[in-house]
Image (spheres, grey):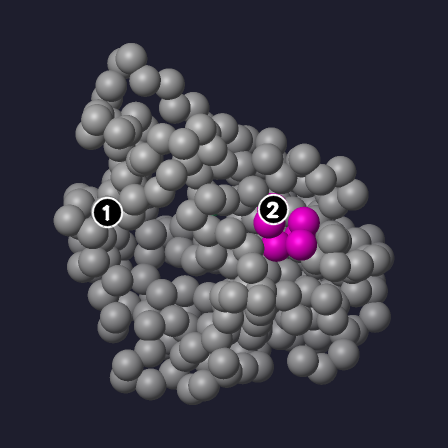
Amino acid sequence: MDPAAMFTDADAAALYDLLNPWDPGRRPGDAFYHGLVMAAGSVLDVGCGTGAMLHHARGEGHAGRLVGLDPDRASLARARRREDVEWVAGTAADAAGQGVVELATMTGHAFQCLVDDDDLRTSLAAVNGALCPGGRFVFETRHPQARAWEEWRPSNATAVIDWSGRELRVCHEVESVADDVVTFTESVLGPGGGVLHVARAVLRFLDPPALDAFLAGAGFTVEARYGDWHRGPVTGESVEIVTVARRDQRAAPSPSTTTATPTAEAPAPAAL
Ligand SMILES: C[S@@+](CC[C@H](N)C(=O)[O-])C[C@H]1O[C@@H](n2cnc3c(N)ncnc32)[C@H](O)[C@@H]1O
């Protein structure tokens, strides 16, 4: 790490937005979610990060309840720049305490941050508990068959000019691949090549059968499954697994780590 250089967690959140601008006009994944969000009366975005999706929805005239939930304080501080959206510090396991919504989302592969089985079960049950009967949970996860992590190497670094005109490079390096769990680092390098910031991440790559078993166990029915952002099927070439899961009409399993339960039930949302 270059001790002379300052690169804060707030800078890392700003860099995330620079590298991943929310733009439904240009990015098919953003367009996919934007349509769902605008059609839903209320939305909980789990793992909302810097809040760009809900910022955009409100800016485009969404008039209903919008809630962003994320454990990362620096990202949430950025999200809070827009005050007409509710922002909550917490993990997916805290979702059931946020009231009842028609649509829950996990975008930007946030779902893959749920790594161990217990956290997956607790988190999915909590998201289920945040939905009205018939409400949808929509998220994407990278298909393990595409082995995305094989591209995560320093030679594939991304160059970017930051807000102060510095040329930075962002590079990834895999530490381990153990079954379906990949551990890697993301490093930000300054103009002279010095390391400004390092973040370590652990992601799980579930295949469709494993995903569906977790969803069924948490009270979801898979309503639609896509292999791309244009609603094509999952094939042997798919890079993404996009899932639309509907909360079963039966009572959701109660999340073990949350005490709050929804007190009001919103009407079931319209079909997608
Ligand atoms: C790659 S970012 C995606 C952010 C945003 N959804 C987007 O589309 O740009 C993943 C986010 O998941 C959040 N996260 C990590 N663990 C989580 C958990 N257990 N529950 C909810 N969110 C989590 C991180 O803090 C981070 O903001």
Q: Position of residue 45 (x, y in %)?
A: 62, 54
Q: Position of residue 37 (x, y in %)?
A: 68, 65
Is 138 on the left or on the right of 213, as rendered?
Answer: right
Please name whichever residue, 162 or 111, is drawn nearer the observer in this view of the structure: 162
Residue at the image position 53 percent from the left and 44 percent from the top? 49
Of the 4 image quadrants, the one containing the N terminus is: top left
Q: Position of residue 72 (x, y in %)?
A: 51, 35
- Residue ranking furthest to the top: 4
Circle 2 is placed at which residue position? 51
Task: Identify whether 241 is placed above or below 204.
Answer: below
* Magenta-colored span: 51-56
Density class for disc 1 (Cα within 10 Å; few <14, some 14-19, many ≥20) is some
Is 136 on the left or on the right of 75, as rendered?
Answer: right
The answer to whether residue 126 of the structure is visible from this angle is no
Please name whichever residue, 187 or 194, is drawn nearer the observer in this view of the structure: 194
Q: Secondary structure of the magenta portion, mostly? A: helix
Tag count = 2
Residue 157 badge: 1
Membership of 112 in magenta stretch: no
As shown in the figure, which amino acid type bears the numbered disc 1? Answer: Ala
Q: CA distance from mark 1 to mark 2?
A: 25 Å
Tag 1 secondary structure = loop
Instruction: Say which label, 1 or 2, has the lower sequence index.
Output: 2
Residue 94 badge: none
Density class for disc 2 (Cα within 10 Å; few <14, some 14-19, many ≥20) is many
Membership of 52 in magenta stretch: yes
Q: Position of residue 253 (x, y in %)?
A: 61, 61
